[in-house]
Image: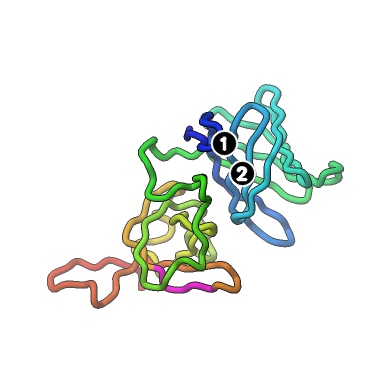
Amino acid sequence: MERKNDKDDEKCTIYQGTLTHPAFGEKDVIFRRLSDTEGTLSVQGATANATIEQSGSSFSIFDGTTTLLGNLDNDGCMKGQVFQKDYDDAFGTFTFNLETSSEEEEPWDLFGKGGRMAVADLREGQVVSGKVVTINTTLGLFINVGPEKDALCRANQLSKPLSEYVAGEKIEGLRIIAINIEKNTFEVSARRLVSDVKEDDKVEGIV
């Protein structure tokens, strides 16, 4: 997906995916390609400038401390390995997919001038909408609803089986049910409260 860059009004291409490491597990990543040679790499909300080198389908992304070496396929998927600055043995892998949402404005500005809002600005009970970023078969869904960190919606808080969700899917009517300021995380639920259900309403969910 191409978006306008507020800073220099150039087009950029956005990729979303995961970086996997044996020690810290799986982390959500957003790679924003600003030009042929420049971009930004965001891991769990922490963003760094990156330089890009590409020859055919092979490419490298370097953010100052870490290098991602991989290949780009015809569907816009990037896959490869993660290396330290000195190119010792690979210590992780990554997979990025080209963001496929439409050009219409989202209800949040993912890379706006003001950046994404802080988790501390949220409140429990707040209703939000978002897009599925990562599907974790153990925990549930990680959903981008606007703040600097993606929201976790656990499997038992979903309105349908986890297997029926796909990356990029929009979910509306999410309710913030827990906020941990110390850990800078928060959780949402897609299930309706008893007080929201009216007589003759059809209610679906997972028991």
Helix, strand or loop for disc 1? loop
Question: Which quadrant is home to the C terminus?
Answer: bottom left
Q: Is residue 179 magenta?
A: yes
Residue 138 vs residue 83, the one in the foreground: 83
> Please, is residue 17 above or below residue 8 in the view?
below
> Please, is residue 204 above or below residue 112 in the view?
below
Q: Can you give x and y, in whole percent of width and height, for residue 194 in the image?
A: 26, 77
Task: Give the amino acid type for the residue marked by disc 2 in the picture.
Answer: Thr
Q: Residue furthest bottom?
A: 194
**Residue drawn at 45 percent across, 55 percent down:** 146
Q: Is residue 118 magenta?
A: no
Q: Can you give x and y, in whole percent of width and height, for residue 167 in the image?
A: 46, 48
Q: Can you give x and y, in whole percent of width and height, for residue 115 in the image?
A: 53, 50
Q: According to the image, label 2 marks what residue?
A: 95
Q: Main secondary structure of the magenta part?
A: strand
Residue 18 vs residue 13, the one in the foreground: 13
The residues tagged by marks 2 and 1 sit, at their Cα atoms, a distance apart of 7 Å
Q: Can you give x and y, in whole percent of width and height, for residue 206 in the image?
A: 35, 69
Which range is magenta?
Answer: 176-180
**Disc 1 residue crowd, few under 14, some 14–19, many 20+, Cα 10 Å:** some
Circles 2 and 1: CB distance less than 8 Å? yes
Task: Give the amino acid type for the residue marked by disc 1 in the picture.
Answer: Cys
Sequence-wise first label, 2 or 1: 1
Q: Residue furthest left?
A: 200
| Picture quadrant of residue 189 | bottom left
Residue 45 vs residue 75, the one in the foreground: 45
**Residue drawn at 60 percent across, 74 percent down:** 182
Q: According to the image, label 1 marks what residue?
A: 77
Helix, strand or loop for disc 2? strand
